[in-house]
Amino acid sequence: MSRVLYTNANLLDGEHAAQSGACVAVQNGRIAAVGASDSVTSGPSDEVIDLQGRTLMPGLVMGHYHAAYRGYGEEGGSQTATGVEQAFLALGNVQTALKCGYTSLISAGTHYNIDVELAEAINTGEVVGPRLVSCSRNYMPAMDAASVMEDEELCMSQGPDGFRKGVLFDLERGVKIIKIFASGGHGAPEGLCMSAEEIQAVVGVAREHGARVRAHVAGKQQILDCVRSGVSIIDHGDETDDECIEAYLEHNVFVLPSAYVLLKAAELGGNMFGFHSDLKDFHNICGLLPKLVDAGVKLVPGDDFGIWQIPHGDYAQELVCYAEHANIAPLELIKWSTLYGGEMTGFSDLGTIAPGKLADLLIVNSDPSTDIGVLAQPENMQAVIKGGELVSGAMPEGLAAASAG
Ligand SMILES: [Zn+2]
């Protein structure tokens, strides 16, 4: 298969500051070489695409994604949809994400095992979509024996054995991540609390099946219980303090603040969840973020898109929010969305532009490392490339003809 050379690129490789005049060679769906435009010599069979200074960057990764949500929480929203309806919503949503430049999604919870089936349909080429790491239905602690229940969206359980049994059901149908609610807060009912023994039971059975566990958790004690029990993804972590930061670093966990929903839920109100109507939680997390960055914690973006206050498609608004309200530099936000996000997928060959990595690439008509808001404007997303193939958008005008020669 012939090589494609993307020349004269403003290269954002996912780790470093922008480098102008770069060239990236792609062959067989992977990055073959990266260098200055004059250092990579083109052969007669190479297709050369002159980017004329446009930005070439890794496909974005969203680390907290709910494919099946649409208008969730408002009248007529997906909470009343059937399983089949939700499956079609999920397909539409992941294709929206792909158009927005998200070539990988890591699920934070689904219904009717939609993630596993959808990932399979994408991987076999039945439908076009991003890479999708599947997640289970939600696991929550039951308040008492009478409220123990399970269906295709939720499993409310009690005791290590109860959780183990529920989780086993999801693992046996191919789920890669188990989602637990270890504590209330950040939109979940106050008072929810899983014991350390219950968390350990979930992690134990997940690991036996090569799966990971992610936890919705806000309370400090439950954060520590999760991290020390082997939960590898901390969703939110509202009450994070120095002790938690130390634990994050020691156990190499990923932390997803998902604070954009706190801002919009407070602004728009009217939710069926437990989000607060004031901005206290939001400002608290924004205050934490620079501290987490300085400490070297691996932060990854992703939020509850699909609940009605934050519709699918607005994904990059979360990044804009952290730039504006927590003063996080654009390049840092790009690192969260590429380097750390890629690592969080569990695949070793995603997230950066380097030889051997999968060629999941974006051609962007402006430089997001100077203004992260560039990613929130659809007209800037010139082309989305997954595994070397164009999956959304088009090669820039005038360049397609040049490359055909
Ligand atoms: Zn969520």
Image: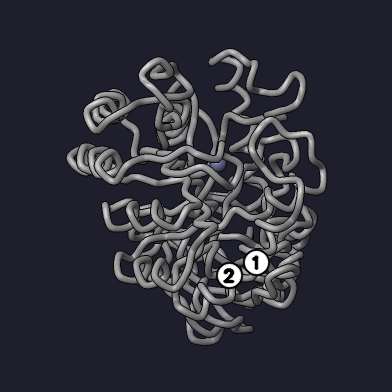
Is residue 44 among the parts visible in the rendering? yes
Residue at 68% across / 29% down in the picture?
A: 72
| Residue 383, quarter of the rendered image | bottom right
Residue at 32% across / 27% down in the picture?
A: 158
Q: Which residue position holds label 1? A: 286
Horizontally, is 228 left or right of 385 in the view? Answer: left
Q: Which residue position holds label 2? A: 289
Residue 28 is situated, as x and y percent measured from the top left of the image, at 40, 55
Horizontally, is 267 left or right of 314 in the view? Answer: right
Under mark 2, the amino acid is Leu
**Crowd band around label 1 with a 10 angstrom C-alpha radius: few (<14), some (14–19), many (20+):** many
Horizontally, is 114 left or right of 405 in the view? Answer: left
Between the residue at mark 2 and the residue at mark 1, the CA separation in whole angstroms equals: 5 Å
User: Under 8 Å from ligand 1: the CB of mark 1?
Assistant: no
Under mark 1, the amino acid is Cys
Which quadrant, please, contains the C terminus?
bottom right
Query: Looking at the picture, does residue 68 appear above or below residue 37?
Result: above
Residue at 73% across / 34% down in the picture?
A: 271
Residue 137 is situated, as x and y percent measured from the top left of the image, at 44, 29
Is residue 28 among the parts visible in the rendering? no
Which quadrant, please, contains the N terminus?
bottom left
Please state which of residues 360 and 271 is positioned toward the viewer in this rendering.
271
Q: Which mark is residue 315?
A: none
Query: Looking at the picture, does residue 139 appear above or below residue 224?
Result: above
| Residue 142, quarter of the rendered image | top left
Q: Are marks 2 and 1 in contact (CB under 8 Å)?
A: yes
Please state which of residues 326 and 364 is positioned toward the viewer in this rendering.
326
**Crowd band around label 2 with a 10 angstrom C-alpha radius: few (<14), some (14–19), many (20+):** some
Residue 302 is situated, as x and y percent measured from the top left of the image, at 57, 51
